[in-house]
Amino acid sequence: MNKRLHAMPQPWRLIYTICWLQTEVDNGGHEQFFSNGRGEFDDETEADLQFIRADHFLKLFRDARQFLYSAPADRTERIPEFEPLDAAFYAQPKSPYVLVGEHVLSHLSDYCID
């Protein structure tokens, strides 16, 4: 599946990557997204957030990514810097799910055939 997802056109791929980000953050914060994904789709998720102009979520994602990859590899505790990022994620008036839906609806030609 990973190869197929990497090969997908961005308009289709972003539905998966951004919704997966939302699901993981809802379930355990940014830290869970990165630990469950093991970095497999970090670049794609960042590019897809940028593509749909989810600027606030993009900044949070980049900050979380920086905290994660600058933390010691042998850490055993949660990274405390994630907590304010998670709170800011939840405080947004529109979730990533909503932003993906709005993007799809405003770009139907990328998803539908007449």
Image (cartoon, grey):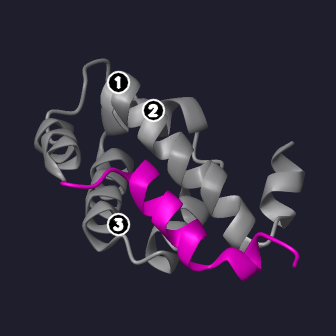
Is residue 9 found left or right of 38 in the rendered image?
right
Residue 5 screen position, x and y as percent: 80, 54
**Cα gap from disc 3 to disc 1, whole angstroms:** 18 Å
Per the picture, the main secondary structure of the magenta-coloured stretch is helix
Residue 4 screen position, x and y as percent: 89, 54
Instruction: Indicate which disc residue 24 carries.
Output: 2
Q: What residue type is labelled 2?
A: Glu
Query: Tag 1, which secondary structure?
Result: helix
Q: Does the magenta stretch include residue 32?
A: no
Query: Tag 3, which secondary structure?
Result: helix
Residue shown at the point (14%, 46%) measured from the top left: 91
Task: Say which quadrant the C terminus sits in.
Answer: bottom right
Residue shown at the point (37%, 35%) measured from the top left: 25
Marks 1,2: beta carbons within 8 A: yes
Q: Which amino acid does label 1 sit on?
A: Gly
Q: Mark 3 points at which residue?
A: 58
Range of magenta residues: 93-114
Binning the other alpha carbons within 10 Å of mark 2 as few (below 14), some (14 to 19) or many (20 upward) gives some
Instruction: Give whichever of 89, 71 is nearer the camera.
Output: 89
Q: In which quarter of the image is residue 48?
A: bottom right
Could you tell which of marks 3 and 2 lies nearer the N-terminus? Answer: 2
Task: Say which quadrant the N terminus sits in.
Answer: top right
Instruction: Indicate which disc residue 28 carries.
Output: 1
Residue shown at the point (10%, 43%) measured from the top left: 84
Q: Can residue 41 be seen in this view?
A: no
**Cα gap from disc 1 to disc 2, whole angstroms:** 6 Å
Q: What residue type is labelled 3?
A: Leu
Residue 2 screen position, x and y as percent: 82, 46
Query: Tag 2, which secondary structure?
Result: helix
